[in-house]
Image (tube, rainbow, N blue to C red):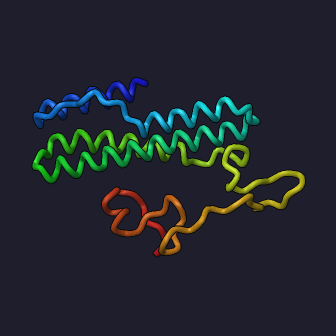
Amino acid sequence: MKETQAHVSTVEKVCQRVGCGTGSNTCEAMEGLIAESEELIGLGLEPAVLDAGLIAAAQKVEHYEIAQYGTLCTFARQLGHDDAAGLLHDILEQERATDEALTQPVGATARPWYPMETADSHAGDYHRPPVPLRGGRRPGEVNGREADELGVGRAEE
């Protein structure tokens, strides 16, 4: 919650610098994502399934925020507000870090596509493997250009 409050404060600061209003409209998309999470909680799911669903719901929120802050960064840069773009980029990186933390393997009970090892399985069995993206990459891998832009390691090309 503190992070969200800090983001709101930063966005208000950005809006003051560039001369725009923050608006007070309710975001229907975000409300829908929150409603999905609340619905999951009310389904009476097994704890591991509920955990996986809530992690996925939290990632949806992060992806929405990443899209929003990425767009705002681009607009700010294109309009020549580099200082505002820098502040928004800082928020964008925090959202990406949160998404990455949610993406880390937390075990087969919460993430059924990671390797499972039980008495009835062979080491390395998978419930379902991640689907390769275009170009044969797996989720989370980046190409050379993306790696350079993000300052991260590259997928094998």
* Count of marks overlaid on the render: 0
Q: Left or right: where does residue 75 sit relative to residue 59?
A: left
**In the rendered view, does 46 fall on the left or right side of 106?**
right
Residue 103 versus residue 28 in the image, above or below: below
Above or below — where is 111 with respect to 152?
above
Q: Residue at x 51, y 44 (%)?
A: 59
Of residue 141 and residue 13, the one placed in the foreground of this image is: 13
Residue 34 x/y as whole percent: 51, 33
Q: Residue 127: where, in percent of width, then height?
A: 74, 58
Residue 86, x across and y down, in percent: 21, 43
Residue 134: % across, % down: 49, 72
Which residue lies at the image location 57% right of the left edge and 47% below the top edge? 104
> Is residue 98 positioned above or below 79 on the image?
above
Determine the residue positioned at 53% across, 73% down.
136
Residue 26 sits in quarter: top left
Residue 14 sits in which quadrant? top left
Direction from residue 80 to residue 49 in the image, left or right: right
State the residue at coordinates (25%, 33%).
11
> Which quarter of the figure has residue 46?
top right
Q: Quadrant of the N terminus?
A: top left
Q: Nearer the viewer, residue 36 or 87?
A: 36
Q: In the figure, is residue 85 to the left or right of 110?
A: left
Name the residue furthest right: 120
